[in-house]
Image: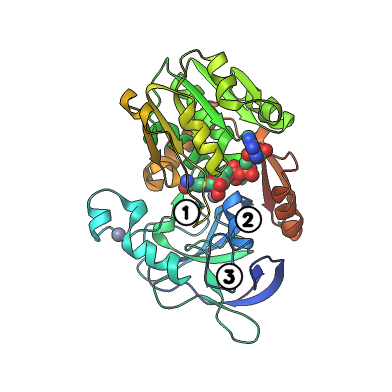
Amino acid sequence: MKTTAAVLHVAGGPLELTGVELADPGPGQVLVRIRATGVCASDLHIVEGRLPKPLPIVPGHEAAGEVVETGPGVDDLRVGAHVVLSILPRCLVCPACRSGRTAHCAWGGGLAATGTLDGTSTAWRLPDGAPLHHFNGVSSFSEYVVVPRSGAIEVDPVLSFGAAALLGCAVMTGVGAVRNAAPVAAGQTVAVIGCGGVGLNVVQGARMAGAARIVAVDVDEAKLELARSVGATDTVDARDRDVPAEVMRLVPGGVDHAFDAIGRPAALQDAYAMLAAGGTAVAVGLYALDDTITLPAFPLIGERHLVGTYMGGADPHVDVPLLAADVLSGALRLDELITERPFAEVNEAIDDLRHGRSLARQVLTFEE
Ligand SMILES: NC(=O)c1ccc[n+]([C@@H]2O[C@H](COP(=O)([O-])OP(=O)(O)OC[C@H]3O[C@@H](n4cnc5c(N)ncnc54)[C@H](O)[C@@H]3O)[C@@H](O)[C@H]2O)c1
Ligand SMILES: [Zn+2]
Ligand SMILES: [Zn+2]
């Protein structure tokens, strides 16, 4: 079939909306009609070439849609099911999968590295017949996609497609960082540096975990306002403050958990600098390949920790349904984070994200 996809030909962009030829789903694959896709800073990293990928490629990875057709061997997903897509397809037989770390599946890693759906082949071609790459088995900046079955998680159709899309990255990463990487216990104190789509969900996760204090840090007053509305107890405008000193003034002795949800070495260093003894700094942001950090060694005597997290340490097949239930119960509030715009505005949306134009999460929608 033909579908319209936003193709990145060269690092730096722009994306070109192109009619491409999409093959039928192969064994273990599913054809999905995308209904909503968030625009995450990780897509921006790809467009700008900071996260190198085989080109040409179709970015987009935070998405929800409807199953249109299932390939041979897929008998546990019906046509019409609503699904959240995930960049964590898995094989369940490699050493990482067998030890429960499916996010680090060797087969899934191979798909990510090769831009294919099975290690060797892609499901779509450019009009001139040249191969087009998939982004970690998702590539949701497209009207239709073929994805591995293990990268599609069925959700309750009561959930809006926009909210469902966010579960696939910003929520899974933000809430997962709180629940799995930190983890935050009731009564503990938290600071979140960067309150974009991911950071606001760290704030929400901390609120749901029962954190006593949640200090939100950003350079944008509108983001700080949103942070307050989803659970921050205190806010710090990073533009005119020494951030660690201000957080330590608000929470004497420092916080139990500090999250860098920007992806900047300086923010991670700040997160470490504002920790109480025994505290944990969580690197949620994605850094450039050549980024480095410098940390004072002495505070380690206070049993401080620095941890990374990939997609919040979540198992999407377990955590997406749990997070969907949190949305439906009203515990997790996503509607107020979402600004919808048509898929045709994908380049403008990326540009707004690049320049931090005060939108929490832009979600591209597709015509009925
Ligand atoms: N670990 C993972 O698996 C994972 C998953 C998803 C996203 N990410 C990464 O998380 C990061 C955040 O993604 P996002 O989509 O929320 O990005 P975003 O651009 O929406 O949010 C970044 C926020 O940081 C704020 N900010 C910028 N400079 C600042 C400063 N000096 N001090 C304080 N705040 C500042 C911005 O105003 C914005 O609100 C990115 O690096 C992204 O690639 C990582
Ligand atoms: Zn993302
Ligand atoms: Zn595996």
Residue 221 at what x, y percent from top left? 73, 29
Q: Is residue 283 left or right of residue 232?
A: left
Tag 2: amino acid: Leu
Nearer the observer, 301 or 98: 301
Snapshot colouring: rainbow
Q: Secondary structure at mark 1?
A: loop
Tag 3: amino acid: Ile
Find out if the beta carbon at label 2 lies less than 8 Å from the nearest ligand 1 atom: yes
Q: Which residue is mark 3?
A: 57
Against 317, residue 120 (above or below) is below
Against 364, residue 336 (above or below) is above
Nearer the observer, 77 or 9: 9
Q: Earlier in the sequence, mark 2 or mark 1?
A: 2
Residue 43 at what x, y percent from top left? 60, 56
Q: Which residue is mark 1?
A: 86
Find out if the beta carbon at label 1 lies less than 8 Å from the nearest ligand 2 atom: no
Against 367, residue 163 (above or below) is above
Location of residue 195 by image quarter: top right
Q: Quadrant of the C terminus?
A: bottom right
Of circles 3 and 2, the one toward us is 2
**How far is disc 1 from disc 3 in space, using C-alphas?**
17 Å
Q: Residue at x 57, y 21 (%)?
A: 245
Residue 145 in sight in this render: yes
Of circles 1 and 3, the one toward us is 3
Q: Secondary structure at mark 3?
A: strand
Q: Is residue 258 left or right of residue 228?
A: left
Q: Which residue is mark 2?
A: 44
Q: Earlier in the sequence, mark 1 or mark 3?
A: 3
